[in-house]
Amino acid sequence: MSFVLDSDTICAIATPPGKSGIGVVRVSGPLSRQIAERILGFNPTPRHAHYCSFNDKSNTAIDQGIALFFSAPHSFTGEDILELQGHGGYFVLDSLLKNILAHGARMARPGEFTERAFLNGKLDLAQAEAIADLIESSSAQAARSAIRTLQGEFSRLVRELSESIVSLRVYIEAAIDFADEEIDFLTEGNTLAKLSAIQRSMEDIFSKAKQGALLQEGMSVVIAGKPNAGKSSLLNALAEKDAAIVTDIAGTTRDTLREHLNIDGMPLHVTDTAGLRESVDPVEQEGIRRALEAIDKADRILLVVDSRNDSLNTSRLKEYLHQMGPFFREKSMDMARITIIRNKIDLQEQTPRLVLETIAGDQQLVNIHLSAKKGQGISLLRDHLKQCMGYQSSEEGSFTARRRHLEALEATRQHLQNAWQQLSIGMAPELVAEDLRQAHTSLGEITGEFTVDDLLGRIFSSFCIGK
């Protein structure tokens, strides 16, 4: 698919199918004014609402409503745009669309209006994606964050970081060009400190983007643990329904079971898994394999243990994980992704509570004492998961992000780290400059400054028609 801007005039119904009070048809391109004159019977005034009839070729009224005309470049796409707001209903909108096509327009591809806005410089790529994110938002906070991205908050931070990288790169390349000068530009200019400041800004953006991605796409949570720990009961408690079969027989759950939940409107994808243990049963082995695959991909792991197992403290956690199979022995587990669920507190008449334990450095491990069967402490777990997803009463500075943005930021992060390592050991400045160039290129993929056509094809093809 080529993304060279063409001169076709495109049209589409912009409202969902079905009967409704209002239906909208959009037209964008060089024939928009001509089509407006033929359908309306007059030359519309730009940015003025005209209440009039929409006519066919024989000048018979198809419908009547509001006509809006926007002249280039002062429009959403940067082209001439005609928008006809009539009555909703298949026959009316279809008749209107057929007449527009008869006047020389063609049907728009999914996302082509937004694609043209991007290609005409009305939006950058992050802002364009925010339109789809806003439409698909499943919570008020996700919608508000998408609006901030659409208004350019994410792009502003990316541009500021990009400018800092370019500025440092120019300074280093100047040092290369004036290598014969007596002054060591790299030392005198405190280059390492400047690069460190850029890395701190990078980490701040990366942290916000991770939370933004969770807000928009939802957090993947896996409930894991040994057989009969109460994993399925925990899923039922979170889902507030009997989603999983619960018995006293260890190994009842043989496969992964997924539920899509919302906590205060925030999307959560929860997977219940088979109990983890060494087994010779081929069916149970397959269930455990699928469980470990889900654990590997999860954003958050709820490790369910029996609260009566007092010996399971922080120092023994890795040993406990190792007992659940070779996966945990062969793979280094990211402890920051784990929340310990100390279940069955009702059997000891304990009260629900959340306890923080310090592990490596200043990292803290969350322990939630609850009873999944009785529903005690589930509110603590819900609040904890909201916090993990970035829920906050104050939404200042929040924005939405996508997985591809995180990948671009991670690449940028790695190039900056490579540059810092090269600079700190006094390696050739040419290598440092090259890493900074690659960091700048990776950042440009977010806004579309450096983007290949196949990526654009994937992005805009996911949009709805008429947007």
Image (cartoon, helix red, strand yellow):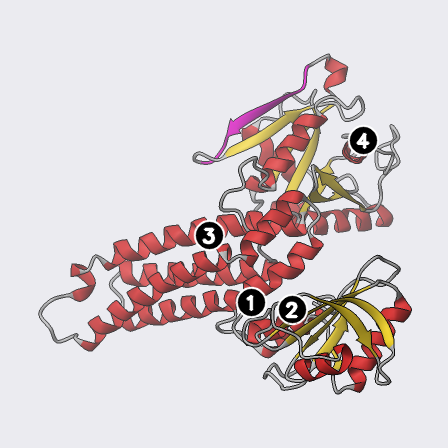
Give the quadrant of residue 63.
bottom right
Q: Nearer the viewer, mark 4 or mark 2?
A: 2
Q: Nearer the viewer, mark 4 or mark 1?
A: 1
User: Dot 1: within a 10 Å radius of its alpha carbon, few (fewer than 14), some, or many (20 or more) residues?
Assistant: many
- Residue at left 48%, top 52%? 206
Label placed on residue 125? 1
User: Dot 4: within a 10 Å radius of its alpha carbon, few (fewer than 14), some, or many (20 or more) residues?
Assistant: many
Image spot of residue 216 (x, y percent): 64, 51
- Which secondary structure dominates the residues rendered in magenta? strand
Q: Spatial distance from mark 2 to mark 1, Cα to Cα?
A: 9 Å
Of pointers 3 and 2, the one earlier in the residue sequence: 3
Of pointers 4 and 2, the one earlier in the residue sequence: 4
- Residue at left 63%, top 47%? 142
Image spot of residue 450 (x, y percent): 49, 73
Of pointers 4 and 1, the one earlier in the residue sequence: 1
Of pointers 3 and 1, the one earlier in the residue sequence: 1
Q: Spatial distance from mark 3 to mark 1, Cα to Cα?
A: 17 Å
* Secondary structure of the residue carrying numbered label 4: helix
3 and 1 marks in contact (CB < 8 Å): no
Give the quadrant of residue 367.
top right
The residue pinned by badge 4 equals 233
The residue pinned by badge 2 equals 459
Q: Nearer the viewer, mark 2 or mark 1?
A: 1
Of pointers 2 and 1, the one earlier in the residue sequence: 1
The stretch of residues the image draws in magenta is 351-360
Q: Spatial distance from mark 3 to mark 4, Cα to Cα?
A: 38 Å
- Say which amino acid is labelled 1: Leu
